[in-house]
Amino acid sequence: MKLATLRDGTRDGRLIVVSRDGERHLPAEGIARTMQAALDDWDEAAPKLSALAERLEGGEGDSLDPTELDAPLPRAYEWVDGSAYINHIVLVRKARGAEPPETLETDPLVYQGGSGVLLGPTDDIELPNPEWGLDFEAEICVVLGDTPRGTTKDDAEKYVRLVMLCNDVTLRNLIPAELKKSFGFFNSKPASAFSPFAVTPDELGDAWKEGRLHRQLATRLNGELAGDPHAGPAMHFSFYDLIQHIAKTRAFTAGTIVGSGTVSNEDEARGVSCLAERRMREKIATGEFVTPFLKEGDHVQIEMLDDDGKSIFGRIDQKVVRA
Amino acid sequence: MKLATLRDGTRDGRLIVVSRDGERHLPAEGIARTMQAALDDWDEAAPKLSALAERLEGGEGDSLDPTELDAPLPRAYEWVDGSAYINHIVLVRKARGAEPPETLETDPLVYQGGSGVLLGPTDDIELPNPEWGLDFEAEICVVLGDTPRGTTKDDAEKYVRLVMLCNDVTLRNLIPAELKKSFGFFNSKPASAFSPFAVTPDELGDAWKEGRLHRQLATRLNGELAGDPHAGPAMHFSFYDLIQHIAKTRAFTAGTIVGSGTVSNEDEARGVSCLAERRMREKIATGEFVTPFLKEGDHVQIEMLDDDGKSIFGRIDQKVVRA
C-alpha cells in the first residue's frame, strides 16, 4: 500500500492511504491520525490501512492534489543517512581533494541528520546565501519499525515498514570546514525533502530484493534529465547492512528514517543524482568545474517509475527560492 | 516550574508538574498529555502548568517516586550536542593523539546525536562489550521551542523553554575509527540519559545568566565524587552561541534538545565529568592511563544542588549492566 500525509495545519498532518496510481485517497481516520501513530502501532494499523488500499483499488476515494502533501513524516525521531553508493563517495571526495576512507568497502558510512523539520515533496528549497553551494542529492530511504540493538542484516528485513525517496539537500561549500572539525555534517545539511508517498516493500514487487531497490532513480534539473542511475546493484551496502551497522550499539524507535546516500553509477551515461558528481567529472575531463551549484529559480524533480511508466513514490518537485 | 514524565506504559509517558523540593507531583492531565505536547503548544500550556506548580507549593500533590520517571522527553525530535567546554576538547583530543581544531575558540563544535530512544534518569546503562570503553559525560542541556533559521545569539533566549542534565553515554574505543571516517559519531554514542526534572530557566534564578548555568555539576562514580566543576565561566560558547550556530542553515522544532558538552574546568581540584579526562590527566602526570573505563556494576550519579543543598534537576542515577 501507499501512504501519505495531508497537510491540515497541525504539526504532523493527517494520514491518508493513496491508490496505486497516486490519484485518489481515503482518510485513515479511526485507524491512525498520523503516519507516526500508524508506525507506533503498526501491527494493529497495517491490516486496516491495507483494507482501505483495497477499497481504493475498487474505485473509492477522493482525488488527490500532490501540492497538499507534506513529507510522509513531517518531523521524525531520527534521520540516519548512509552513503552506500561507493562511486559517489569516491567522486565527491575527489571533488574536495580528500581521500576515501580506508574502510570504504567494509565499514558503512552513515551520519545522523536533523529530523525535526523535514520538507514536503513540493516545498521550496530556501537559499539564504548562494555562496553556500546548494546541491540536491537523490536518494532512496526506508522507514523502520522498532528496531532492537544488535539487529543483524539477516534479521533486518522485518523492521523495514516503508520505502520512500529523498532529496538530501546539501550545502557543499560548508562541508570542508565542517568535516575538518571531525564532528560530522551539521550546517551543511539543511532540511531534506521526501517523496509524496511512502510505500510498503510488497508494493515494489521483485524490484525490492535483499534490501536494495532495483529500479532507476530519475532526477531532472530545470526539466532536463540530470541522471537516471540504477539504484540496485551499485548499492554496495544494502539497507540491511546499514541497519546492522547502525544497530550495533543502540536501538531505534518506530519512524526512524534510514537513507541510502546519493544514488550513483560508475557508468557516466547514467548521469548524476547530485551536481557535485557532475562537477567532479567535468574537472577530471577538462580541468575545470563547469556546472554551477543551484541558484534561485532552479527546479529539481526526483522520481522513480515502474514498468508501466507510473510514478511509484510520486514526484519530489522543488524550486529554489532566495530566502 | 519543574516538569517531569511519569512512565505509564506508553511511548511518551505522561506529563507531571513537580514541587520545587522534588517530592510531590500533580498530573498535567487536561493541559498536555505529554512533555512534547506541552512544548508543541507552550504559550497555551505554560501558564496552566505554572498554576499547578503554585498549587504544589501550597502543599497539594501526591508523593513522587523518582524510579517511576522516564526521561523528560523519552523520544525527542533532535538531540544536538555541543562541546562548549574547551578544556574537555583539549584533554580528550590529547587522549586520542589528535589535535584540537584550529577554530577551537571561534567556531562551536556540535554533533547531531540519536534522539529516538533516550534513557530515563535511573535506567541501566547496557554494556554489550567491555572492550568498547564505556564512559559517562555529565552535561547541561536546554530544550528549545520552535526556533527559526537565522536565530542569533541576541534572540536565542526566548526559545529556551527548559533546562535539564544529561549523561551523554560514550563508547570511547569506538571513537577513533569513527572520526577517521569524518562523518561524526554514530556507534560511539549510544542512548543518552536525562535528569528527572526539566525546569524553566526562571526556576534557576540568578544562576541562569546569558545562556550559562552558573552552578557546580557533581558527578559521583561508585559513591565517590569524580568531579564538581563550575558549569558557568568555563563554558566558552554559551547556549545562545550554540543556538546561533546550529540555526545558521535550518530551523528547529519544539522539543529539540541542545547539550553543552562535558562540563570541564582547567582546575584539576574540580575533578572530572568523564573518565576520559581523568585518564588523560593520569597519562600526562605518570605516563600511564590508570583508571579503567566503566564496567559491569559501576554506578554513576549526576546532580546539581542549589544554595540550600537541594537537588535542582533530581539525580541521574544509573548502574552499568552487562547486556
Image (spheres, coloured by chain):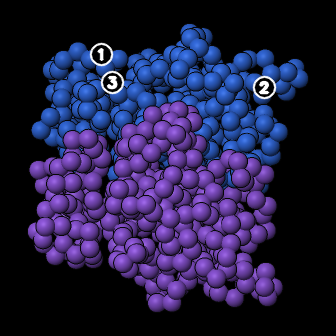
Chain colours: A purple, B blue
Number of other residues with Cα within 10 Å of mark 2, as a class: few under 14, some 14 to 19, many 20 or more: many
Q: Chain of mark 1?
A: B
Q: Chain of mark 3?
A: B
Q: Chain of mark 2?
A: B
- What's the CA distance linking mark 2 and mark 1? 38 Å
* Residue highlighted by disc 2: B281
Q: For residue B69, which numbered disc appears in the image?
A: 3
User: Which residue is nearer to you in this view: B77 or A301?
Assistant: A301
Q: Are marks 2 and 3 on the same chain?
A: yes
Q: Residue at x 64, y 52 (%)?
A: A109
* Residue highlighted by disc 1: B65
In this view, B50 is above or below A119: above
Q: Position of residue B316 (x, y in %)?
A: 46, 22
Q: Earlier in the sequence, mark 2 or mark 1?
A: 1
Q: Amino acid at mark 2?
A: Arg
Badge 2 marks a residue whose secondary structure is helix
Q: State which quarter of the image contains the C terminus of chain A.
A: bottom left
Q: Amino acid at mark 1?
A: Asp
Q: Amino acid at mark 3?
A: Leu
> As drawn, is A228 to the left or to the right of A94?
left
Question: Quarter of the image holding residue A11?
Answer: bottom left
Q: Position of residue B90 (x, y in %)?
A: 75, 40
Badge 3 marks a residue whose secondary structure is strand
